[in-house]
Amino acid sequence: MMLAEKLSGTPSDADDPPLETIGFHGLKAGPKLLVMGAVHGNETCGPQAIARVIADCREGRVRIARGEVTFLPVANPKAYRQNTREGDRNLNRDLRERPQPVDNEDRIGNRLTAILRAHDALLDVHSFSGEGVPFVFFGPDDNRGALEPFRHAAAEMEFAGALGVELMIHGWLDIYVRLIAARERLDLPRLAVTEGFGTTEFMRFAGGYGVTLECGRHDDPVSVDVGYAAIRNVLAHCGLTDEDPPRAERRTVVHMDDLVICEAQGDRLEGSWRTGDRVAKGTPIARRADGTVVPMPRDGFIIFPNPTAHPGEGICYLGTESARRR
């Protein structure tokens, strides 16, 4: 270790591996697309799907004719090498530039935000731990509000719809604000709104648009196939390749607009739900520690059921059919 490194306390390269990007530049004008994986290190379908598409590009099965695509297979190398969700903390929370970074994700964030700013659109490939169908998270409608002002809603929704998954969900930051309010009512430590900001939120803040694709269960090989097909689809959708873009299909669009919060140790999920499950009004969906049943308040959908929720966390989120249609 060099003397300067010892004096500064800077981690060694073994602790702070660099970010690797692979890019392909078409010879005609077009948009700049960023595709990334392993924001969470134990979600390996993204790196595997991206590696397949890179091989296709190198071997001529996919030809980038216009624009640019940058692949960032592993956005969190430390967590990826450890096969853990996080290096030091969740990279997909409170993502912003930090003049004085203090942990692995801070240091990654300073590089990652610069990479995001250099592109027009983002596909962030993830997976999840439980059972459920693949789905895509997209952002708000066009607005000039304080929470998440945006002007590319139509383009982002078309981008999300082109991935090839049937379930589309929006409403993340609005529901995060409700989670903060619920925690305050329980006199739990306050969360900042910026804790809800990840890669796609920063991309919108920087003037572009982006979506989060949840491909399926972490260890399911089909998740890799879902991610691979989605990447190929968006390359065609954005016009980077000469392949026919995917056909416009009707999707199930859900507005995530409510949550059931764990208020005390012993509050728990009632039933074996999966994200995207339709649930009728009155169906028991959670049970409080004192035995009180929490029913579904209206016909709708279960999102992110959490059978191990702790006080202040969501037991599950709820959604309704969205007025936004594709």
Image (tube, rainbow, N blue to C red):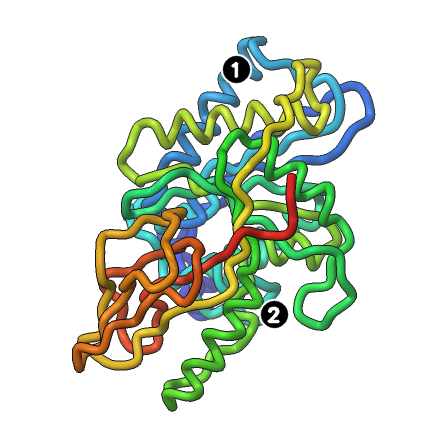
Q: Quadrant of residue 290?
A: bottom left
Residue at 32 percent of width and 66 percent of height: 315
x and y, in percent, of residue 187 in the image: 38, 90
How many other residues sit within 10 Å of disc 1, few (<14), some (14-19) or many (≥20)?
Answer: some
Disc 1 residue type?
A: Asp
**Closer-to-camera residue (260/152):** 260
Q: Where is residue 294 in the image (x, y as percent from the top left)?
A: 30, 71
Q: Residue 99 carries which label?
A: 2
Residue at x 61% of width, y 57% of height: 201
Mark 2 is surrounded, within 10 Å at the Cα level, by few (under 14), some (14 to 19) or many (20 or more) other residues, namely few
Q: Nearer the viewer, residue 75 or 162?
A: 162
- 75 above or below 201? above
The x and y percentages for residue 281 are 38, 61
Question: Looking at the rendering, in which quadrant would you find the N terminus?
Answer: bottom left
User: Which mark is first along the chain, 2 or 1?
Assistant: 1
Q: In this view, does 69 lie above or below 18?
A: above
Q: Which of marks 1 and 2 is in front?
A: 1
Q: Is residue 326 left or right of residue 176?
A: right
Residue 295 or residue 130, whichever sits in front? 295
- The residue tagged with tag 1: helix, strand or loop? helix
Residue occupying the far bottom of the picture: 187
Q: Which mark is residue 56?
A: 1
